[in-house]
Amino acid sequence: MRDTEGLSAYRWTIVFASALILAIAMGSIVNGMSAYIVPIEDAYGWDRGDIALINVAGIIGLAAGGLIMGPQADKRGTRPVVLFGAVAIGICYLAASFATALWQFYLLMFCAGFFGAAAIFPPIMASIGNWFPIGAGLAIGLASGGQALGQGGVPFASSFLIKSFGISGALAVTGAVMLAVLIPLALLLRQPPALSTRSAAARAAEDRTYPPAKLVIPAMCAAILLCCTCMSVPLMHLVPLCQDKGFSADEAGSVIFLMLMVAIAGRVAFGKLADIIGALPAYMTATAWMGLLVYGFMWMESLSGFYVYAALYGFGYAGVMTGVLVSIASLTHPSRRASAMAIVSLFGWLGHANGGYLGGYLYDLTGGYSLAYSIAAYAAALNLLVVGTLYIRTRGPRMRALNA
């Protein structure tokens, strides 16, 4: 009984260690380069669309690498794979501090995504789902909230690091922090005991209660591609949008920092909502929230207006990723969950890359962000259609229990 109680308590250690790992690693890869866009443009004179490709390279690396690292985590366990990723991402950022050409930034950020973040995100999210066979929404929401903390905190901190140490110095400090913090946190991770104690026959019987992967995986891939295309436009281009409207780098960075701090509460809240009304309904609610509000950033003119609107948008948009992750956890078998996370995440990161590049490309093409934010809203609407269709098609006996 004591061992069971100890393991039940330790799973919360897994959640909070995972949240901190995701904050640093994913905050750096997903949109950490947003604080560097204008400084690099000023320092090197490169086009903003080309600079945005630095972040795109990292996300593409993350997307591709997950297809290898996810199955490795299913096979070898979470800790060794995440530990490898922690070392890899830290070394890549240290090496990036010596980069002076675009191709060098592209290569190093791709490697940071492929060998680093890809070894962290799918294994960790699958592990949390496996540690919480019941009530995974809140746990995934808390861990996902850590990622939101990083997505706001890393660009915000980077703006101060760039101001104090320059572009190279900021990258070097980030890499050193990664190695010093991520490695000890990765050592805290364990494999959930349930996976090793179930018999093969029990796992096979349980597998038959899940909806077919050929239905779930394609639908979730399409959905996440669309929702991440939408959300990555403000994630990558809200800071430069604020700067274009006359606000300083520190002020612009504080807007996205506030948005993503509120997003922490949103991710946790929508995780709990998923436990109450079901994963897919919670996902659809967050998608509708994000799609209805995303274009409104274009109408903001004052700093106070940006603050208020960023907080409002951030709470609802944050529920989208929680909804995606909880949906995958509820619709896939535990023994193949990391692989499923990796496959679906591939399309999510491609969506992030697509939206991030789209914002820069359309800015260079039109001289503004209006078209990019419009396309983001349409992508959210299409995503809502896909997820709604999946919800209708997975209303079997087991799915009624999971989604209602």
Image (spheres, rainbow, N blue to C red):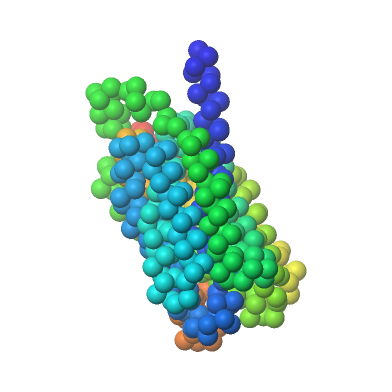
Q: Position of residue 193 (x, y in %)?
A: 40, 25
Q: Out of 385 and 297, give the one closest to the viewer.
A: 297
Q: Out of 338 and 313, give the one closest to the viewer.
A: 338
Which residue is painted at 48% across and 37% down in the image? 187
Which residue is painted at 57% across and 53% down in the image? 177
Asked if residue 355 shows in the view, the reply is no
* Horizontal side of residue 205 vs 266, given as left or right: left
Q: Is residue 285 above or below residue 33?
A: above
Q: Is residue 147 above or below residue 52?
A: above
Q: Position of residue 346 (x, y in %)?
A: 36, 56
Residue 163 position by quadrant: bottom right
Q: Position of residue 224 (x, y in %)?
A: 41, 57
* Horizontal side of residue 40 vs 110, given as left or right: right
Residue 156 position by quadrant: bottom right
Outermost residue to the top:
1
Asked if residue 128 shows in the view, the reply is yes
Q: Out of 380 and 17, give the one closest to the viewer.
A: 17
Which residue is painted at 56% across and 46% down in the image? 181
Which residue is painted at 53% across and 40% down in the image? 184
Residue 196 position by quadrant: top left
* Horizontal side of residue 135 vs 104, given as left or right: right
